[in-house]
Image: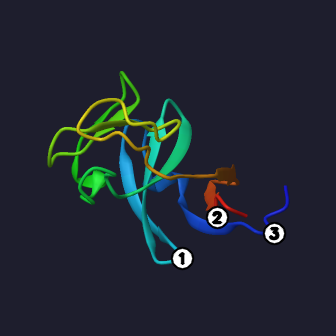
Amino acid sequence: MSTEGWTVLCATAEVLPGETHVAWFDDVALVVINFDGMFYALEDRCTHDEFELSAGPFDPGTGQIECVLHGARFDVRSGEAMCAPAYEPVRKYPLKVEDGVIYVRDPDA
């Protein structure tokens, strides 16, 4: 696989199954989630009140991460807001995994 246009984000070993990890890409904090062996990256910012999603729990049963500030939940696979008080999705970043390394790229590229 080519890594042109992709940036190293972190190692897969840093994000165990059912866990989250914060990494930085272009001055943006991302919360990286390992959900059933698949990796997802969302901007680490609740769309309701700009709070860090990484401070909240990830539920591996539902695939949702919860903002601890007001209880908004987001689907880690799509970034979709699942309940009030958030109505806007969280920005999702494309990832690929190669040789134990997670790569990310700009979602607008």
Residue 11 horizontal/vertical position (percent):
54, 59
Residue type, mark 2 in image: Asp
Q: Report the quarter where the N terminus lies.
A: bottom right
For the point 37% across and 48% down, the residue is: 20
**Residue linked to disc 3:** 4
Residue 95 horizontal/vertical position (percent):
63, 52
Residue type, mark 3 in image: Glu
Q: Are marks 2 and 1 in contact (CB under 8 Å)?
A: yes
Q: Identify the mark nearer the N-term, 2 or 1.
A: 1
Seen as rendered, the residue at the extreme bottom is 27
For the residues labelled 2 and 1, the Cα–Cα distance comes to 9 Å
Q: Is residue 87 above or below residue 109?
A: above
Which mark is on residue 57?
A: none
Foreground mark, 1 or 3, reads 1
Which mark is on residue 26?
A: 1
For the residues labelled 3 and 2, the Cα–Cα distance comes to 12 Å
Name which quarter of the figure residue 4 lies in: bottom right
For the residues labelled 1 and 3, the Cα–Cα distance comes to 16 Å
For the point 37% across and 58% down, the residue is: 44
Seen as rendered, the residue at the extreme top is 61
Between 15 and 81, the residue placed more toward the observer is 81
Indicate the secondary structure of the residue bearing disc 1.
loop
Residue 14 horizontal/vertical position (percent):
44, 56
